[in-house]
Image (cartoon, rainbow, N blue to C red):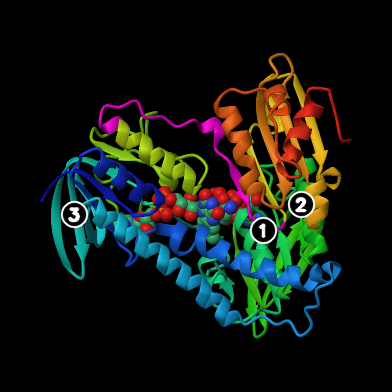
């Protein structure tokens, strides 16, 4: 079979690229080794984790906050199997949506393992049989897989990856989460809200180190109030399984720590997925982390072969993969596709959520900017107080000379939605004054970001 484009991998990068290519008139095929389309994001990542986060957030709010509204939630309980079924139904429904989009756009779907046989050939293998596809362009969108630790084999029973931690049948009594990044904090929150004693062990001196220290310290305090415990600056060195679970040995400065738990969640990052792909054999260059190397147009060193998403360098985020997908296909079609890597939002869906775009304070200083900063506490925001969600901060970082916004961070309920305003502002090269002079509906939490901009320009209002 002959195609203009063969996409290998049907995650948010791969399926978005296939849709865009079909819309631009390319004869397109998509190859996926797993049964369902949607990749990590839909099947074991973004969507199932958010389904569990919203179920458990409701449960937690009912337990801890309903009383203050005068609502009694006596006899409250959580049926974990029902919560998991809801999550699975959501994933199945969304996967059907992707099937529909493939059919609607006339994309040939091929089930099986894709391997690059040569610069213009992809071999698809399934159940011992194989077929060869001729491709004018090949797009590698094979994503990533869980990283593990050398002394801690993930067995799916006691030692878990995120794949397992989104599918537990019962609430564990205790869990050590290794890694205080996005997965550790999100899935740690899920189980802590259901009663698991969660201890997060993080190598670095703070959690979620991609945010500024004032933001992560505030986040850590709020998570501690929810029952999570933290050992920071701590490295786990060895593990021993026993009847009740696992005993971990860790080092914190010059102290040795012993930690015991029923389950251990390993959340120390993800690695690019190139196993069995035949990329290296076809001469495609990889970098030192094993990511596929590309130029600024997502072309590998082999003409006709491109790569995007988690399998290439950069933040491992679904929206980054999607944006690259659109841009790379536009480039194939001779259009000027591009991605603005300075405005990729980043969110951790804890309660409250934490979101950022652009440079954090340290990065802005490192780059030589003289900066103006505005930090506004949601305690002074009417809507936040009225809703009982006043924990958190909005922060705007601007270049002092030009006023241009370099970055923003928000710790609050719905920060994932609120950050979009800062992303758009930065996309248009807007200033803190632009944000401060923009009318925001009252009372809204979005006024918090505006207030932070007011502070950054030296004209605070409600503080
Ligand atoms: P993937 O989604 O990994 O898809 C790659 C696909 O390629 C897979 O379906 C795989 O089976 C297939 N494949 C691999 N090799 C082959 C082969 N040789 N032949 C055929 N098929 C192959 N990101 C966010 O932006 N927001 C979130 O809230 C978020 N939450 C997450 C929560 C968790 C628990 C995890 C694990 C990840 C989360 N992520 C989140 C990250 C997000 O899932 C990834 O960044 C995103 O899925 C990357 O998309 P991709 O298309 O590059 O790769
Ligand atoms: P991460 O990179 O976000 O966090 C890993 C954390 O583990 C880091 O803080 C790191 O310092 C720590 N760490 C590494 N080795 C350690 C060790 N030996 N001991 C203790 N701590 C150690 O990775 P993740 O949380 O596993 O997530 C994987 C990928 O999935 C990330 O790239 C992330 O962007 C993506 N993801 C995104 C979201 C989201 O957007 N909301 C949610 C989940 C996952």
Residue shown at 68% from the left, 48% from the top: 354
Q: Residue at x 57, y 61 (%)?
A: 50
In the image, residue 427 lies in the stretch drawn in magenta: no
What residue sits 78% from the left and 73% below the top? Answer: 63
Q: What number is the disc on residue 219?
A: 2
SS at circle 2:
helix
Is residue 173 found left or right of 357 in the rendered image?
right
Identify the main secondary structure in magenta.
loop
Is label 1 in contact with label 3 (beta carbons under 8 Å)? no
357 w.r.t. 122: above or below: above
Taking 67 as reference, is 429 above or below it?
above
Q: Is 384 in front, or is 43?
A: 384
Viewer-closest of 62 and 363: 62
Do the residues bearing badges 1 and 2 touch, measured as CB atoms within 8 Å?
Answer: yes
Label ID, residue 293: none
Residue 336 forms part of the magenta stretch? yes
Q: Which residue is mark 3?
A: 123
Residue 155 seen in this snapshot: no
Give the CA separation, mark 1 to mark 3: 39 Å
Query: Is 128 on the left-hand or right-hand side of 173?
Result: left
Label 1 crowd bin: few (<14), some (14–19), many (20+), radius 10 Å = many
Q: Quadrant of the C terminus?
A: top right
Q: What separation in Å lies between label 2 and label 3 (alpha carbons)?
A: 48 Å
Q: Which residues are magenta?
A: 331-351
Residue 80: image location, x then y, percent: 60, 80
Q: Which residue is mark 1?
A: 185
Mark 1: secondary structure: helix
Quarter-of-image position of residue 356: top right
**351 displayed left or right of 45:** right
Q: Nearer the viewer, mark 1 or mark 3?
A: 1
Question: Would you say residue 362 is visible in this rendering?
Answer: yes
Disc 1 residue lies near ligand 2 with CB under 8 A? yes
């Amino acid at each position: 079979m002959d195609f203009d484009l063969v996409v290998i991998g049907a995650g948010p990068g791969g399926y978005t690229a296939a849709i865009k290519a079909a819309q631009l008139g390319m004869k397109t095929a998509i190859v996926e080794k797993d049964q369902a389309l949607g990749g990590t994001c839909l099947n074991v990542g973004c969507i199932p984790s958010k389904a569990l986060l919203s179920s458990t957030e409701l449960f937690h709010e009912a337990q801890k906050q309903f009383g203050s509204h005068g609502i009694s939630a006596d006899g409250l309980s959580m049926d974990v199997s029902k919560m998991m079924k809801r999550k699975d139904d959501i994933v199945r429904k969304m996967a059907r949506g992707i099937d529909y989009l493939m059919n609607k756009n006339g994309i040939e779907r091929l089930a099986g393992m894709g391997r690059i046989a040569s610069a213009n050939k992809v071999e698809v293998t399934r159940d011992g049989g194989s077929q060869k596809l001729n491709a004018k362009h090949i797009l590698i969108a094979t994503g990533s897989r869980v990283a593990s630790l050398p002394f801690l084999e993930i067995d799916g029973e006691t030692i878990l990856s995120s794949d397992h931690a989104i599918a537990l049948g019962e609430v564990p009594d205790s869990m050590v989460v290794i890694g205080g990044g996005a997965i550790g904090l999100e899935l740690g929150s899920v189980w802590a809200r259901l009663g698991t004693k969660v201890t997060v062990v993080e190598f670095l001196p703070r959690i979620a180190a991609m945010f500024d220290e004032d933001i992560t310290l505030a986040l850590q305090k709020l998570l501690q109030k929810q029952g999570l415990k933290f050992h920071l600056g701590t490295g786990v060195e060895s593990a021993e399984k026993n009847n009740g679970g696992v005993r971990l040995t860790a080092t914190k400065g010059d102290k040795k720590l012993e930690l015991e738990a029923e389950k251990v969640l390993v959340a120390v990052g993800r690695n690019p997925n190139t196993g069995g792909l035949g990329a290296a054999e076809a001469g495609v260059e990889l970098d030192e982390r094993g990511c596929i190397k590309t130029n600024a147009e997502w072309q590998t060193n082999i003409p006709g072969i491109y790569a995007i998403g988690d399998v290439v360098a950069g933040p491992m985020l679904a929206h980054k993969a999607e944006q690259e997908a659109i841009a790379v296909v536009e480039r194939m079609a001779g259009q000027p596709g591009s991605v603005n890597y300075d405005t990729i939002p980043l969110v951790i869906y804890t309660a409250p959520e934490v979101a950022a775009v652009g440079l954090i304070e340290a990065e802005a200083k490192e780059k030589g900017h003289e900066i103006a900063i505005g930090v506004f506490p949601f305690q002074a925001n009417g809507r936040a107080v009225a809703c009982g969600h006043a924990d958190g901060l909005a922060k705007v970082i601007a270049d002092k000379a030009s006023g241009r916004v370099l970055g923003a961070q928000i710790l609050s309920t719905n920060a994932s939605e609120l950050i979009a305003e800062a992303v758009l502002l930065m996309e248009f090269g807007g200033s803190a004054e632009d944000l401060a002079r923009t009318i925001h509906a009252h009372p809204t939490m979005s006024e918090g970001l505006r207030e932070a901009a007011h502070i950054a320009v030296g004209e605070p209002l409600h503080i």
